[in-house]
Image (cartoon, coloured by chain):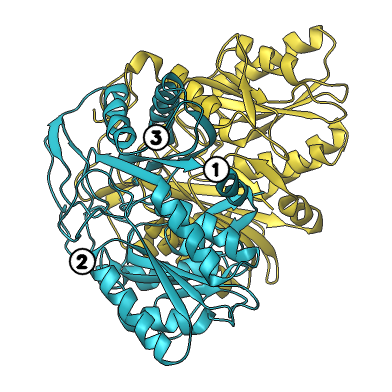
Chain colours: A cyan, B yellow
């Protein structure tokens, strides 16, 4: 295991310390555990947004805490759901008068623990709503999922619901906007190599020298199939065909594109994938409103990528364009 | 070679197409070759900044074209200097009345070709100045260098000279500021794994399963030595001791920190390195003014990192904080 770490048992704690030292202008850490909140929490006169999940997906989720996105990010152990207590502490630390929206990626443990925290907070009189993101079109059920998994499309939910909250919308409206993003975003990924959970010390799966996995989850969950490595254009065409099959896009529709690296994939390769994504959309008469290429929802040092498309209307466009200032996602 | 590419011979061309499709709001590509310029080039009433080098270091340099940073980025083949013609075309495309500053990383080919382009442009009556960045304290001469190599600290030169240019300073002043950054920035890196130049198809060096290289260059040039993999804190302490030895920092001085991933290193690990960087600076009584953690100057899918420190004064702080809006580096 070749990693820049000290002790596999404390990677999340040491990472959190490193994040807070890097970004004191954005975040502080709660004393009770691995929870990052906005420096100026609790929220005043805005809905508070709380998200999180297992660690290993950086910059998700701590990198999205800041103006116009999240108010708190809860970090579980690597690839492990945060506990209900952690989420509950996050809710209490950020909740203002306008209530709290939980943005949960669809993994059984995450959903269970975030919902348990919601109940705990509600018993204290805090109004909490939740949404579950399930953008991954690859597989219907999976190792840790009933239904579809939540992957990189979640970042669009953070951004857009975050803009609505920052604009002062009430909890019902912020939740409605988040649900609208969830209804309109679709993603699919693939992996060239596995990654190594530090505490395990060995790869979470193996792939042959000339083999890739299509539809791979962000924790190494199996995808739809394995096959021989193909040219980037062929891979992109396959991912796009699965995504487009599942979306109701017509000639003239507008989308936001996210080409997301899983951790070890150079930007060079992501741009080559992006080139083909645009070519295919252009052929379908679908307009690209805005493109995001980079690492947004990773799987530590996994090599591979995912593509996400978000169908836009005027409301979503305005919220996507609204300023955000977080370590991992800035819109001027 | 597991890469998301189509044909190794055209990776740079296809990447450039992917960049322009992703960021039409920032850049356009010159017809004459792999040169990206600001969408609204040529410059009006500001000094134009031109940088670049071999490809494979993304987001450098194309990702830094935009408001408050570069006006043009010239992309050579992977790990290969751009030609004088390319640089000359870049200069001609962006030059306004206030002249052009070339920001060159210290590699023999880059220096030679940028200087040749400078002469060609001067013969056409364009005023051109140049600076050479040599922030890497690891080795004095190297495979492709006389003197020290230019690495991630170059991004601070882009940012700070870019802010001075955007503020309307004249060419002498912009050059003076760039020289000031160069005089005050030091970096050093290390690698856990090599990378593969697509056209070569095999790793540019090899490292044992439990071995790392200290002082490695961003093209896989040998560093100071190889040794057994150590904990992140030990590695960071070594890099920092070499950097600090070479800087004239006193108690109370302020620095900007950049912890740069070489391509395949997860943010988790970079934050663990950052934690130790801050601890060491704190012990020395040096204050951290601002921290940047991410991938700024990569070596495709190489795993490893570099640390850069920039000693600041009030002028440099103000320019570092000035707004920049580029795909790869945004300051609000």
Query: For the residue labelled by badge 1, is the local secondary structure a helix, a strand or a loop?
Result: loop
Tags 3 and 2 on a common chain: no
Q: Which residue is mark 2?
A: A199
Q: Nearer the viewer, residue B326 or B270?
A: B326
Residue B158, image x, y percentages:
67, 39
Q: Residue at x 59, y 67 (%)?
A: A26
Depth check, mark 3 against mark 1: the one in front is: 1
Viewed as shown, does residue A111 lie left or right of B52? left
Q: Nearer the viewer, residue B257 or B139?
A: B257
Q: Measuring 74% from the left and 40% from the top, which residue is drawn there?
A: B161
Q: CA distance from mark 2 to mark 1?
A: 44 Å
Per the rendering, the mark at residue B99 is none
On the same chain, marks 2 and 1? The answer is yes
Seen from the viewer's position, the closer of residues B169 and B181 is B169
Name the disc covering residue B300, or none: 3
Quadrant position of residue B206: top left
- Image quarter (top left, top right, bottom left or bottom right) of the N terminus of chain A: bottom left
Badge 1: residue crowd in 10 Å (few <14, some 14–19, many ≥20): few
Tell me the chain of label 1: A
Q: Look at 59% across and 58% down and name the residue there.
A: A163
* Residue neighbourhood size for the residue with mark 2, other residues' Cα within 10 Å, grouped as few (<14), some (14–19), many (≥20): few
Q: Is residue B94 left or right of residue B99?
A: left
Q: Nearer the viewer, residue A13 or B216?
A: A13
Checking the image for residue A313, the label placed there is 1
Q: Earlier in the sequence, mark 2 or mark 1?
A: 2
| Subunit ID for the residue under disc 2 | A
């Amino acid at each position: 295991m070749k990693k820049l770490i000290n002790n596999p048992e404390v990677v999340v704690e040491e990472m959190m310390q490193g994040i807070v030292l890097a970004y004191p202008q954005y975040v502080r850490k709660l004393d009770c555990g691995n929870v990052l909140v906005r420096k100026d929490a609790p929220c005043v006169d805005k809905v508070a947004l709380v998200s999180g999940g297992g660690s290993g997906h950086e910059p998700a989720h701590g990198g999205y805490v800041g103006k116009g996105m999240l108010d708190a990010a809860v970090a579980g152990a690597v690839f492990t759901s945060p506990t209900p207590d952690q989420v509950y502490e996050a809710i209490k630390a950020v909740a203002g008068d306008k209530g709290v929206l939980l943005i949960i990626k669809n993994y059984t443990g995450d959903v269970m623990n975030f919902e348990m925290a919601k109940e705990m907070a509600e018993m204290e009189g805090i109004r909490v709503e939740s949404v579950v993101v399930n953008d991954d079109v690859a597989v219907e059920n999976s190792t840790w999922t009933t239904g579809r998994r939540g992957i990189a499309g979640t970042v669009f939910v953070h951004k857009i619901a975050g803009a609505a909250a920052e604009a002062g919308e009430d909890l019902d409206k912020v939740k409605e906007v988040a649900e609208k993003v969830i209804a309109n975003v679709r993603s699919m990924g693939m992996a060239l190599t596995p990654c190594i959970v530090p505490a395990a010390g060995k790869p979470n799966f193996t792939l042959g020298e000339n083999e890739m996995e299509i539809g791979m989850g962000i924790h190494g969950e199996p995808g739809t199939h394995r096959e021989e490595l193909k040219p980037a254009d062929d891979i992109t065409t396959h991912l796009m065909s699965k995504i487009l099959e599942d979306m109701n896009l017509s000639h003239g529709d507008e989308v936001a594109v996210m080409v997301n690296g899983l951790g070890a994939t150079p930007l060079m390769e992501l741009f080559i994938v992006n080139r083909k994504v645009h070519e295919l959309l252009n052929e379908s008469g679908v307009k690209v409103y805005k493109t995001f290429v980079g690492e947004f929802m990773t799987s530590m040092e996994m090599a591979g990528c995912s593509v996400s498309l978000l169908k836009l209307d005027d409301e979503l466009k305005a919220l996507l364009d609204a300023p955000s200032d977080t370590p991992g996602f800035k819109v001027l």
